[in-house]
Image (cartoon, rainbow, N blue to C red):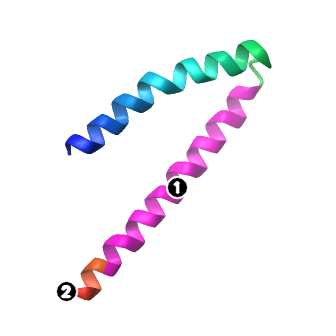
Amino acid sequence: MGFQMAAAYTGSTLVPPMLGLLAANINLGIFPIFIVIFAIAMLLCTEQLNRFVARIRTAN
């Protein structure tokens, strides 16, 4: 649980400034692309975790 909280705090600390830098240097139109990229990344990480947990359950 501690690792999850650390990851959440890291994301909430780093993502807004990163988006701000991109928006300042490109334009605010990058925001939807940014959201889609992060949504896909979350989906891929969740599916990877599901496969990992399923492998552990079948091994036991």
The residue wearing badge 1 is 43
Above/below status of 41 relative to 48: above
- Residue at the image point whose x is 36% and y is 35% from the top: 8
Say which element carries label 2: loop
Q: Which of marks 1 and 2 is in front?
A: 2
- Residue at the image point whose x is 47% and y is 64% from the top: 47
User: In the picture, residue 1 is in which quadrant?
Assistant: top left
Residue 42 drawn at (x, y percent) = 50, 50
Q: Which mark is residue 60?
A: 2
Say which element carries label 1: helix
User: In the picture, residue 60 is in which quadrant?
Assistant: bottom left
Magenta stretch: give its range: 30-55
Asked whether 20 falls inside the magenta stretch, the response is no
Above/below status of 44 relative to 9: below
- Residue at the image point whose x is 46% and y is 65% from the top: 48
Answer few, some or many: residues within 10 Å of disc 2's Cα (few below 14, many 20 plus, some between 14 and 19). Answer: few
Above/below status of 47 relative to 8: below
Residue 58 drawn at (x, y percent) = 28, 86
